[in-house]
Image (cartoon, grey):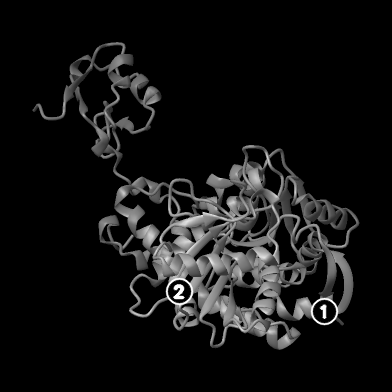
Amino acid sequence: MAKQDYELSWRDLEIGCIVTEPGSASNYKTGDWRSQRPTYDFTKCIKCGVCSIYCPEPCIYPNEEGYFEADLFYCKGCGICARECPTGVITMVAEEEQ
Amino acid sequence: MSKRVGMEASFAVAEAAKLARIEVAAAYPITPQTHIVERLSEIVADGEVDAEFICVESEHSAMSACLGSAAAGARTFTATAGQGLELMHEVLYVASSSRLPIVLAVADRAISGPLSVWGDHSDAMATRDCGWIQVFSINGQEAFDLTICAFKISEDPKVLFPMMVHLDGFHVSHVVEPIILLDQEEVDSFLPPFTYPFPLNPDTPVTMGAFGPPVIYTEAKKAQEEALIATKDTILEVWNEFGKRFGRYYAPIDTYRAEDAEILLLTMGSFSQTAEIAIDKMREEGKRVGLVKLRLWRPFPFEELRKVVRDAKVLIVFDRCLSFGGTGGPVCGEVKAALYAEEKRPKIANFVGGLGGRDVLPEEFEQMVKRGLEMAEKGQERTYEMIGVRE
Protein backbone atom coordinates (compact mmCIF):
# COMPACT_ATOMS: atom_id res chain seq x y z
CA MET A 1 0.00 0.00 0.00
CA ALA A 2 1.41 3.33 -1.05
CA LYS A 3 -0.29 5.28 1.70
CA GLN A 4 -0.58 4.39 5.36
CA ASP A 5 -4.13 3.81 6.66
CA TYR A 6 -4.18 7.13 8.49
CA GLU A 7 -3.24 8.97 5.29
CA LEU A 8 -6.13 7.60 3.19
CA SER A 9 -8.91 10.03 2.35
CA TRP A 10 -12.43 8.80 1.61
CA ARG A 11 -11.66 9.27 -2.08
CA ASP A 12 -8.81 6.75 -1.88
CA LEU A 13 -10.96 3.83 -0.79
CA GLU A 14 -12.03 1.15 -3.26
CA ILE A 15 -15.75 0.79 -3.94
CA GLY A 16 -17.41 -0.82 -0.92
CA CYS A 17 -14.06 -0.81 0.93
CA ILE A 18 -13.11 -3.88 -1.10
CA VAL A 19 -9.52 -4.92 -0.47
CA THR A 20 -7.82 -5.71 -3.78
CA GLU A 21 -4.37 -6.54 -2.40
CA PRO A 22 -4.27 -10.21 -1.33
CA GLY A 23 -2.72 -10.89 2.07
CA SER A 24 -2.81 -7.26 3.13
CA ALA A 25 -4.20 -8.23 6.55
CA SER A 26 -0.57 -8.95 7.43
CA ASN A 27 0.01 -5.18 7.36
CA TYR A 28 -2.31 -4.80 10.33
CA LYS A 29 -0.41 -4.29 13.55
CA THR A 30 -2.22 -6.35 16.15
CA GLY A 31 0.76 -5.93 18.48
CA ASP A 32 -0.59 -2.63 19.74
CA TRP A 33 -3.48 -4.45 21.45
CA ARG A 34 -0.93 -5.86 23.86
CA SER A 35 -0.78 -4.99 27.56
CA GLN A 36 1.71 -7.71 28.46
CA ARG A 37 4.79 -8.82 26.55
CA PRO A 38 6.63 -12.14 26.61
CA THR A 39 10.23 -12.15 27.89
CA TYR A 40 12.58 -15.09 27.51
CA ASP A 41 15.21 -17.01 29.45
CA PHE A 42 16.60 -18.99 26.54
CA THR A 43 19.00 -20.90 28.82
CA LYS A 44 15.94 -23.03 29.72
CA CYS A 45 14.69 -23.42 26.11
CA ILE A 46 14.75 -26.95 24.63
CA LYS A 47 13.51 -25.68 21.21
CA CYS A 48 10.45 -27.93 21.36
CA GLY A 49 8.22 -25.35 19.62
CA VAL A 50 5.16 -25.95 21.84
CA CYS A 51 4.76 -22.19 22.27
CA SER A 52 4.64 -21.79 18.47
CA ILE A 53 1.98 -24.50 18.14
CA TYR A 54 -0.26 -22.98 20.82
CA CYS A 55 0.11 -19.34 19.67
CA PRO A 56 -3.35 -18.30 18.41
CA GLU A 57 -1.91 -15.48 16.29
CA PRO A 58 0.32 -17.49 15.12
CA CYS A 59 3.37 -15.29 15.37
CA ILE A 60 6.06 -17.36 17.12
CA TYR A 61 8.93 -18.53 14.95
CA PRO A 62 12.50 -19.77 15.58
CA ASN A 63 15.05 -16.94 15.64
CA GLU A 64 18.52 -17.15 14.06
CA GLU A 65 19.77 -19.32 16.94
CA GLY A 66 16.76 -21.61 16.75
CA TYR A 67 15.02 -20.30 19.90
CA PHE A 68 11.31 -19.66 19.57
CA GLU A 69 10.33 -16.00 19.88
CA ALA A 70 7.15 -13.97 19.26
CA ASP A 71 6.96 -11.32 16.54
CA LEU A 72 5.89 -8.31 18.59
CA PHE A 73 4.31 -6.65 15.52
CA TYR A 74 1.53 -9.24 15.85
CA CYS A 75 1.78 -10.62 19.43
CA LYS A 76 -1.37 -9.60 21.38
CA GLY A 77 0.19 -10.61 24.69
CA CYS A 78 -2.32 -13.34 25.54
CA GLY A 79 0.28 -15.31 27.53
CA ILE A 80 -0.74 -18.75 26.24
CA CYS A 81 2.91 -19.43 25.23
CA ALA A 82 4.06 -18.70 28.79
CA ARG A 83 1.32 -20.95 30.20
CA GLU A 84 2.19 -23.85 27.87
CA CYS A 85 6.02 -23.69 27.86
CA PRO A 86 7.14 -26.97 29.58
CA THR A 87 10.43 -25.53 30.86
CA GLY A 88 9.31 -22.09 32.01
CA VAL A 89 11.28 -20.03 29.47
CA ILE A 90 8.66 -17.32 29.07
CA THR A 91 7.58 -14.71 31.61
CA MET A 92 4.90 -12.16 30.75
CA VAL A 93 5.69 -8.63 31.92
CA ALA A 94 3.49 -5.54 31.81
CA GLU A 95 4.25 -3.39 28.77
CA GLU A 96 5.21 -0.33 30.81
CA GLU A 97 7.91 -2.29 32.68
CA GLN A 98 11.36 -2.62 31.18
CA MET B 1 -43.91 -5.44 -28.94
CA SER B 2 -45.33 -4.24 -25.66
CA LYS B 3 -48.69 -5.71 -24.80
CA ARG B 4 -51.41 -4.53 -22.48
CA VAL B 5 -52.65 -7.23 -20.15
CA GLY B 6 -54.79 -7.51 -17.06
CA MET B 7 -52.38 -8.67 -14.39
CA GLU B 8 -51.88 -8.60 -10.66
CA ALA B 9 -49.09 -6.16 -9.80
CA SER B 10 -47.14 -8.85 -7.92
CA PHE B 11 -47.11 -11.01 -11.04
CA ALA B 12 -45.98 -8.01 -13.10
CA VAL B 13 -43.01 -7.56 -10.76
CA ALA B 14 -42.14 -11.25 -11.22
CA GLU B 15 -42.43 -10.72 -15.00
CA ALA B 16 -40.07 -7.75 -14.70
CA ALA B 17 -37.50 -9.92 -12.91
CA LYS B 18 -37.86 -12.54 -15.64
CA LEU B 19 -37.52 -10.01 -18.47
CA ALA B 20 -34.45 -8.59 -16.72
CA ARG B 21 -32.95 -12.08 -17.08
CA ILE B 22 -32.13 -12.40 -13.41
CA GLU B 23 -29.54 -15.05 -12.66
CA VAL B 24 -30.28 -15.61 -8.97
CA ALA B 25 -33.33 -15.12 -6.77
CA ALA B 26 -33.13 -16.00 -3.09
CA ALA B 27 -36.42 -15.46 -1.35
CA TYR B 28 -38.75 -16.44 1.44
CA PRO B 29 -42.52 -16.02 1.22
CA ILE B 30 -44.34 -13.47 3.35
CA THR B 31 -47.68 -11.73 2.96
CA PRO B 32 -48.32 -9.50 1.02
CA GLN B 33 -45.24 -10.16 -1.07
CA THR B 34 -45.70 -13.92 -1.53
CA HIS B 35 -47.28 -13.71 -4.99
CA ILE B 36 -44.10 -12.12 -6.38
CA VAL B 37 -41.75 -14.95 -5.43
CA GLU B 38 -44.40 -17.63 -5.87
CA ARG B 39 -44.91 -16.55 -9.48
CA LEU B 40 -41.17 -16.11 -9.96
CA SER B 41 -40.47 -19.61 -8.66
CA GLU B 42 -42.90 -20.97 -11.28
CA ILE B 43 -41.21 -18.93 -13.98
CA VAL B 44 -37.80 -20.31 -12.98
CA ALA B 45 -39.10 -23.88 -12.62
CA ASP B 46 -40.68 -23.68 -16.08
CA GLY B 47 -37.34 -22.66 -17.54
CA GLU B 48 -38.62 -19.28 -18.75
CA VAL B 49 -35.51 -17.66 -17.31
CA ASP B 50 -32.10 -19.25 -16.75
CA ALA B 51 -31.83 -18.52 -13.03
CA GLU B 52 -31.15 -20.23 -9.74
CA PHE B 53 -34.05 -19.92 -7.30
CA ILE B 54 -32.67 -20.43 -3.81
CA CYS B 55 -35.33 -21.45 -1.28
CA VAL B 56 -33.89 -20.13 1.96
CA GLU B 57 -35.06 -20.60 5.54
CA SER B 58 -35.54 -16.92 6.38
CA GLU B 59 -35.29 -13.41 5.01
CA HIS B 60 -31.98 -12.97 6.83
CA SER B 61 -30.69 -15.87 4.76
CA ALA B 62 -32.38 -14.54 1.62
CA MET B 63 -30.50 -11.26 1.77
CA SER B 64 -27.28 -13.01 2.82
CA ALA B 65 -27.52 -15.30 -0.22
CA CYS B 66 -28.15 -12.22 -2.36
CA LEU B 67 -24.91 -10.69 -1.06
CA GLY B 68 -22.95 -13.70 -2.22
CA SER B 69 -24.74 -13.86 -5.52
CA ALA B 70 -24.17 -10.18 -6.33
CA ALA B 71 -20.56 -10.43 -5.17
CA ALA B 72 -20.03 -13.24 -7.65
CA GLY B 73 -21.36 -10.94 -10.37
CA ALA B 74 -24.82 -12.43 -10.89
CA ARG B 75 -27.93 -10.34 -11.51
CA THR B 76 -29.80 -10.76 -8.23
CA PHE B 77 -33.39 -10.25 -7.15
CA THR B 78 -35.44 -10.82 -4.04
CA ALA B 79 -38.68 -9.59 -2.55
CA THR B 80 -40.11 -9.28 0.92
CA ALA B 81 -42.44 -7.30 3.19
CA GLY B 82 -43.08 -6.24 6.76
CA GLN B 83 -41.48 -8.53 9.33
CA GLY B 84 -39.43 -10.10 6.53
CA LEU B 85 -37.79 -6.78 5.76
CA GLU B 86 -37.09 -6.35 9.47
CA LEU B 87 -35.43 -9.77 9.61
CA MET B 88 -33.23 -8.73 6.67
CA HIS B 89 -32.34 -5.53 8.43
CA GLU B 90 -28.70 -6.01 9.42
CA VAL B 91 -27.83 -7.57 6.07
CA LEU B 92 -29.34 -4.62 4.18
CA TYR B 93 -26.55 -2.43 5.56
CA VAL B 94 -23.91 -4.91 4.40
CA ALA B 95 -25.33 -4.87 0.86
CA SER B 96 -25.20 -1.08 0.58
CA SER B 97 -21.86 -0.55 2.30
CA SER B 98 -20.34 -3.32 0.16
CA ARG B 99 -21.87 -1.61 -2.90
CA LEU B 100 -23.54 -4.77 -4.18
CA PRO B 101 -26.30 -4.33 -6.76
CA ILE B 102 -29.40 -6.23 -5.66
CA VAL B 103 -32.98 -5.41 -6.57
CA LEU B 104 -35.48 -5.88 -3.77
CA ALA B 105 -39.22 -5.50 -4.29
CA VAL B 106 -41.00 -4.62 -1.05
CA ALA B 107 -44.77 -5.05 -0.80
CA ASP B 108 -44.95 -2.61 2.09
CA ARG B 109 -46.65 -3.90 5.20
CA ALA B 110 -47.29 -2.81 8.77
CA ILE B 111 -45.04 -4.05 11.57
CA SER B 112 -46.31 -6.12 14.52
CA GLY B 113 -47.90 -5.66 16.96
CA PRO B 114 -50.71 -6.13 17.02
CA LEU B 115 -49.94 -8.58 14.26
CA SER B 116 -50.89 -7.07 10.95
CA VAL B 117 -50.30 -8.42 7.47
CA TRP B 118 -51.88 -5.33 5.91
CA GLY B 119 -50.23 -2.43 4.22
CA ASP B 120 -48.49 0.72 5.41
CA HIS B 121 -44.98 2.16 5.24
CA SER B 122 -43.67 1.16 8.67
CA ASP B 123 -41.38 -1.53 7.24
CA ALA B 124 -39.91 0.84 4.66
CA MET B 125 -39.30 3.59 7.18
CA ALA B 126 -37.43 1.24 9.51
CA THR B 127 -34.96 0.73 6.65
CA ARG B 128 -34.75 4.41 5.82
CA ASP B 129 -31.12 4.80 6.83
CA CYS B 130 -29.77 1.52 5.47
CA GLY B 131 -28.11 3.19 2.49
CA TRP B 132 -30.18 1.67 -0.32
CA ILE B 133 -31.67 3.56 -3.24
CA GLN B 134 -35.42 3.51 -2.55
CA VAL B 135 -38.34 4.33 -4.81
CA PHE B 136 -42.08 4.13 -4.22
CA SER B 137 -44.45 3.07 -6.97
CA ILE B 138 -48.03 4.24 -7.16
CA ASN B 139 -49.54 1.37 -9.17
CA GLY B 140 -48.71 -1.92 -10.87
CA GLN B 141 -47.41 -0.28 -14.02
CA GLU B 142 -44.94 1.75 -12.02
CA ALA B 143 -43.92 -1.29 -9.99
CA PHE B 144 -43.18 -3.14 -13.26
CA ASP B 145 -41.36 -0.25 -14.94
CA LEU B 146 -39.39 0.80 -11.88
CA THR B 147 -38.26 -2.80 -11.28
CA ILE B 148 -36.85 -3.01 -14.83
CA CYS B 149 -35.18 0.39 -14.33
CA ALA B 150 -33.88 -0.67 -10.90
CA PHE B 151 -31.58 -3.29 -12.41
CA LYS B 152 -30.11 -0.77 -14.83
CA ILE B 153 -29.65 1.87 -12.13
CA SER B 154 -28.34 -0.46 -9.45
CA GLU B 155 -25.78 -2.16 -11.73
CA ASP B 156 -24.51 0.98 -13.44
CA PRO B 157 -20.72 1.23 -12.83
CA LYS B 158 -21.29 4.78 -11.53
CA VAL B 159 -23.89 3.51 -9.04
CA LEU B 160 -23.30 -0.04 -7.72
CA PHE B 161 -25.87 0.23 -4.95
CA PRO B 162 -28.73 -2.09 -4.03
CA MET B 163 -32.18 -0.72 -4.75
CA MET B 164 -35.60 -1.20 -3.20
CA VAL B 165 -38.75 -0.85 -5.27
CA HIS B 166 -41.67 -0.31 -2.93
CA LEU B 167 -45.22 -1.21 -3.86
CA ASP B 168 -47.91 -0.82 -1.20
CA GLY B 169 -49.00 -4.15 0.23
CA PHE B 170 -52.46 -5.15 -1.11
CA HIS B 171 -53.34 -1.65 -2.40
CA VAL B 172 -50.82 -2.27 -5.20
CA SER B 173 -49.45 -5.77 -4.76
CA HIS B 174 -52.77 -7.62 -4.96
CA VAL B 175 -54.61 -5.42 -7.43
CA VAL B 176 -55.27 -6.72 -10.93
CA GLU B 177 -54.92 -3.81 -13.29
CA PRO B 178 -54.14 -3.13 -16.93
CA ILE B 179 -50.36 -3.24 -17.27
CA ILE B 180 -48.29 -2.67 -20.39
CA LEU B 181 -45.62 -5.38 -20.35
CA LEU B 182 -42.45 -4.89 -22.34
CA ASP B 183 -41.26 -7.80 -24.46
CA GLN B 184 -37.90 -9.53 -24.12
CA GLU B 185 -36.33 -7.73 -27.07
CA GLU B 186 -37.28 -4.34 -25.68
CA VAL B 187 -35.88 -5.12 -22.23
CA ASP B 188 -32.68 -6.63 -23.70
CA SER B 189 -32.10 -3.48 -25.73
CA PHE B 190 -32.57 -1.33 -22.60
CA LEU B 191 -30.79 -3.44 -20.00
CA PRO B 192 -27.25 -4.64 -20.76
CA PRO B 193 -25.79 -7.74 -19.07
CA PHE B 194 -24.43 -7.15 -15.57
CA THR B 195 -20.68 -6.90 -15.11
CA TYR B 196 -19.47 -6.28 -11.58
CA PRO B 197 -16.00 -4.66 -11.41
CA PHE B 198 -14.66 -6.80 -8.55
CA PRO B 199 -16.42 -10.17 -8.80
CA LEU B 200 -15.35 -12.92 -6.44
CA ASN B 201 -12.98 -14.91 -8.61
CA PRO B 202 -10.01 -17.02 -7.51
CA ASP B 203 -7.92 -15.62 -10.38
CA THR B 204 -8.26 -12.05 -9.11
CA PRO B 205 -8.75 -12.38 -5.36
CA VAL B 206 -10.39 -9.58 -3.38
CA THR B 207 -11.58 -9.26 0.19
CA MET B 208 -15.16 -8.10 0.74
CA GLY B 209 -16.71 -7.21 4.06
CA ALA B 210 -13.34 -6.67 5.70
CA PHE B 211 -12.79 -5.22 9.14
CA GLY B 212 -12.96 -1.40 9.18
CA PRO B 213 -11.02 -0.12 12.18
CA PRO B 214 -11.62 3.41 13.54
CA VAL B 215 -8.87 4.75 11.27
CA ILE B 216 -10.94 3.83 8.16
CA TYR B 217 -14.64 3.59 9.17
CA THR B 218 -15.38 7.33 8.99
CA GLU B 219 -13.83 7.60 5.53
CA ALA B 220 -15.80 4.53 4.42
CA LYS B 221 -19.09 6.14 5.52
CA LYS B 222 -18.22 9.45 3.84
CA ALA B 223 -17.42 7.59 0.60
CA GLN B 224 -20.72 5.69 0.84
CA GLU B 225 -22.73 8.87 1.43
CA GLU B 226 -21.09 10.76 -1.45
CA ALA B 227 -21.60 7.78 -3.75
CA LEU B 228 -25.29 7.43 -2.81
CA ILE B 229 -25.96 11.13 -3.38
CA ALA B 230 -24.19 10.87 -6.75
CA THR B 231 -26.53 8.07 -7.90
CA LYS B 232 -29.25 10.61 -8.59
CA ASP B 233 -27.73 11.61 -11.94
CA THR B 234 -27.84 8.01 -13.13
CA ILE B 235 -31.36 7.50 -11.76
CA LEU B 236 -32.51 10.49 -13.82
CA GLU B 237 -30.61 9.28 -16.91
CA VAL B 238 -32.07 5.79 -16.72
CA TRP B 239 -35.64 7.00 -16.14
CA ASN B 240 -35.21 9.45 -19.00
CA GLU B 241 -33.95 6.74 -21.35
CA PHE B 242 -36.83 4.49 -20.29
CA GLY B 243 -39.27 7.31 -21.07
CA LYS B 244 -37.76 7.97 -24.49
CA ARG B 245 -37.87 4.29 -25.43
CA PHE B 246 -41.19 3.25 -23.97
CA GLY B 247 -43.15 6.47 -23.46
CA ARG B 248 -43.55 6.33 -19.68
CA TYR B 249 -41.48 8.97 -17.92
CA TYR B 250 -40.54 8.89 -14.25
CA ALA B 251 -39.14 11.64 -12.05
CA PRO B 252 -38.08 11.90 -8.39
CA ILE B 253 -41.19 13.99 -7.76
CA ASP B 254 -44.34 14.33 -9.84
CA THR B 255 -47.00 16.94 -9.38
CA TYR B 256 -50.69 16.88 -10.16
CA ARG B 257 -52.57 20.14 -10.79
CA ALA B 258 -49.97 21.89 -8.67
CA GLU B 259 -49.41 24.92 -10.89
CA ASP B 260 -50.55 28.08 -9.05
CA ALA B 261 -51.65 25.93 -6.08
CA GLU B 262 -51.71 27.66 -2.70
CA ILE B 263 -52.28 24.41 -0.87
CA LEU B 264 -50.27 21.32 -1.68
CA LEU B 265 -50.83 17.77 -0.50
CA LEU B 266 -47.79 15.51 -0.45
CA THR B 267 -48.13 11.73 -0.63
CA MET B 268 -45.93 8.74 -1.35
CA GLY B 269 -47.15 5.44 -2.77
CA SER B 270 -50.57 4.22 -3.86
CA PHE B 271 -52.65 6.73 -1.92
CA SER B 272 -51.45 9.39 -4.34
CA GLN B 273 -54.11 8.17 -6.76
CA THR B 274 -56.83 8.52 -4.12
CA ALA B 275 -55.56 12.00 -3.34
CA GLU B 276 -55.84 12.93 -7.04
CA ILE B 277 -59.59 12.25 -6.88
CA ALA B 278 -59.86 14.59 -3.93
CA ILE B 279 -57.77 17.23 -5.72
CA ASP B 280 -60.05 17.07 -8.78
CA LYS B 281 -63.13 17.62 -6.62
CA MET B 282 -61.58 20.52 -4.71
CA ARG B 283 -60.37 22.11 -7.96
CA GLU B 284 -63.94 21.93 -9.30
CA GLU B 285 -65.00 23.82 -6.18
CA GLY B 286 -62.46 26.50 -7.09
CA LYS B 287 -59.87 25.67 -4.43
CA ARG B 288 -56.28 26.18 -5.50
CA VAL B 289 -55.10 22.77 -4.38
CA GLY B 290 -52.49 20.50 -5.94
CA LEU B 291 -50.64 17.26 -5.25
CA VAL B 292 -46.95 16.46 -4.87
CA LYS B 293 -46.10 12.79 -5.36
CA LEU B 294 -42.80 11.72 -3.92
CA ARG B 295 -41.30 8.79 -5.82
CA LEU B 296 -37.58 8.85 -4.99
CA TRP B 297 -37.17 8.40 -1.23
CA ARG B 298 -33.42 7.77 -1.13
CA PRO B 299 -31.35 9.64 -2.16
CA PHE B 300 -33.88 12.30 -1.14
CA PRO B 301 -34.64 14.82 -3.92
CA PHE B 302 -34.06 18.00 -1.90
CA GLU B 303 -33.77 20.41 -4.84
CA GLU B 304 -36.81 19.07 -6.65
CA LEU B 305 -38.90 19.28 -3.47
CA ARG B 306 -37.84 22.85 -2.70
CA LYS B 307 -38.70 23.89 -6.24
CA VAL B 308 -42.21 22.44 -6.33
CA VAL B 309 -43.36 23.63 -2.90
CA ARG B 310 -41.67 27.05 -2.86
CA ASP B 311 -44.71 29.09 -3.88
CA ALA B 312 -47.33 27.25 -1.85
CA LYS B 313 -48.75 28.74 1.35
CA VAL B 314 -49.51 25.46 3.07
CA LEU B 315 -48.03 22.03 2.51
CA ILE B 316 -49.94 19.07 3.94
CA VAL B 317 -47.88 15.89 4.24
CA PHE B 318 -49.58 12.52 4.52
CA ASP B 319 -47.57 9.71 6.14
CA ARG B 320 -48.39 6.00 6.35
CA CYS B 321 -46.03 5.48 9.25
CA LEU B 322 -45.62 6.89 12.73
CA SER B 323 -42.26 7.64 14.32
CA PHE B 324 -43.20 7.00 17.94
CA GLY B 325 -42.30 9.78 20.31
CA GLY B 326 -40.69 11.65 17.46
CA THR B 327 -41.69 14.12 14.78
CA GLY B 328 -44.86 12.30 13.66
CA GLY B 329 -44.56 10.97 10.13
CA PRO B 330 -41.06 10.24 8.81
CA VAL B 331 -41.77 11.73 5.37
CA CYS B 332 -42.93 14.95 6.95
CA GLY B 333 -39.87 15.06 9.21
CA GLU B 334 -37.73 14.81 6.10
CA VAL B 335 -39.74 17.45 4.24
CA LYS B 336 -39.51 19.87 7.17
CA ALA B 337 -35.75 19.38 7.40
CA ALA B 338 -35.41 19.95 3.66
CA LEU B 339 -37.21 23.28 3.91
CA TYR B 340 -35.95 24.60 7.25
CA ALA B 341 -33.17 26.74 5.78
CA GLU B 342 -35.35 28.18 3.01
CA GLU B 343 -36.38 31.80 3.37
CA LYS B 344 -39.56 31.23 1.42
CA ARG B 345 -41.37 28.09 2.43
CA PRO B 346 -44.92 26.94 3.12
CA LYS B 347 -46.36 26.19 6.53
CA ILE B 348 -46.42 22.45 6.97
CA ALA B 349 -49.12 20.26 8.51
CA ASN B 350 -48.69 16.53 8.97
CA PHE B 351 -51.27 13.75 9.00
CA VAL B 352 -50.59 10.13 9.77
CA GLY B 353 -53.04 7.51 8.54
CA GLY B 354 -53.60 4.50 6.34
CA LEU B 355 -51.93 2.38 9.01
CA GLY B 356 -52.13 -1.41 8.93
CA GLY B 357 -54.32 -1.52 5.84
CA ARG B 358 -56.84 1.16 6.94
CA ASP B 359 -58.27 2.80 3.86
CA VAL B 360 -58.05 6.54 3.34
CA LEU B 361 -60.88 7.86 1.22
CA PRO B 362 -60.91 10.94 -1.03
CA GLU B 363 -63.15 12.68 1.54
CA GLU B 364 -60.45 12.20 4.15
CA PHE B 365 -57.91 13.93 1.93
CA GLU B 366 -60.42 16.80 1.69
CA GLN B 367 -60.63 16.82 5.49
CA MET B 368 -56.83 16.89 5.71
CA VAL B 369 -56.75 19.97 3.49
CA LYS B 370 -59.44 21.69 5.56
CA ARG B 371 -57.92 20.79 8.89
CA GLY B 372 -54.37 21.47 7.65
CA LEU B 373 -55.40 25.01 6.72
CA GLU B 374 -56.88 25.55 10.19
CA MET B 375 -53.71 24.23 11.81
CA ALA B 376 -51.58 26.53 9.66
CA GLU B 377 -53.73 29.57 10.49
CA LYS B 378 -53.61 28.83 14.21
CA GLY B 379 -49.88 28.11 14.10
CA GLN B 380 -50.45 24.51 15.17
CA GLU B 381 -48.73 23.06 12.15
CA ARG B 382 -45.71 21.96 14.14
CA THR B 383 -47.61 19.00 15.51
CA TYR B 384 -49.17 16.13 13.60
CA GLU B 385 -52.62 14.59 13.74
CA MET B 386 -53.84 11.10 13.02
CA ILE B 387 -56.50 10.86 10.34
CA GLY B 388 -59.37 8.43 10.66
CA VAL B 389 -58.64 7.48 14.26
CA ARG B 390 -61.67 6.93 16.53
CA GLU B 391 -61.46 9.19 19.55
Observer-nearest of B112 and B226: B112
Compared across the picture, whether B278 is left or right of B134 comes to: right
Observer-nearest of B374 and B132: B374
Separation (CA) of disc 1 from disc 2:
36 Å
Which label sits in the foreground, 1 or 2? 2
Compared across the picture, whether B223 is left or right of B77 comes to: left
Observer-nearest of B37 and B336: B336
**Crowd around label 1: few <14 · some 14–19 · many ≥20 (10 Å):** few
Chain letter of disc 1?
B
Q: Amino acid at mark 1?
A: Glu
Q: Position of residue B85 (x, y in %)?
A: 62, 48
Compared across the picture, whether B45 is left or right of B369 comes to: right
Observer-nearest of B374 and B245: B374
Q: Position of residue B51 (x, y in %)?
A: 79, 57
Chain letter of disc 2?
B
Residue B205: which numbered mark, if any? Answer: none
**Contact flag, marks 1 and 2 (Cβ < 8 Å):** no
Residue at 54% x, 83% y: name it: B261
Quadrant position of residue B291:
bottom right
Task: Residue lying at the far left in this picture: please name it.
Answer: A98
Identify the secondary structure beneath mark 2: helix
- Residue B154 visible in the current orientation: yes
Residue at numbered disc 1: B185
Residue at numbered disc 2: B302
Q: Amino acid at mark 2?
A: Phe
**Crowd around label 2: few <14 · some 14–19 · many ≥20 (10 Å):** some
- Residue B197 visible in the current orientation: no
Identify the secondary structure beneath mark 1: helix
- How many numbered marks, from 0 up? 2
Quadrant including the N terminus of chain B: bottom right
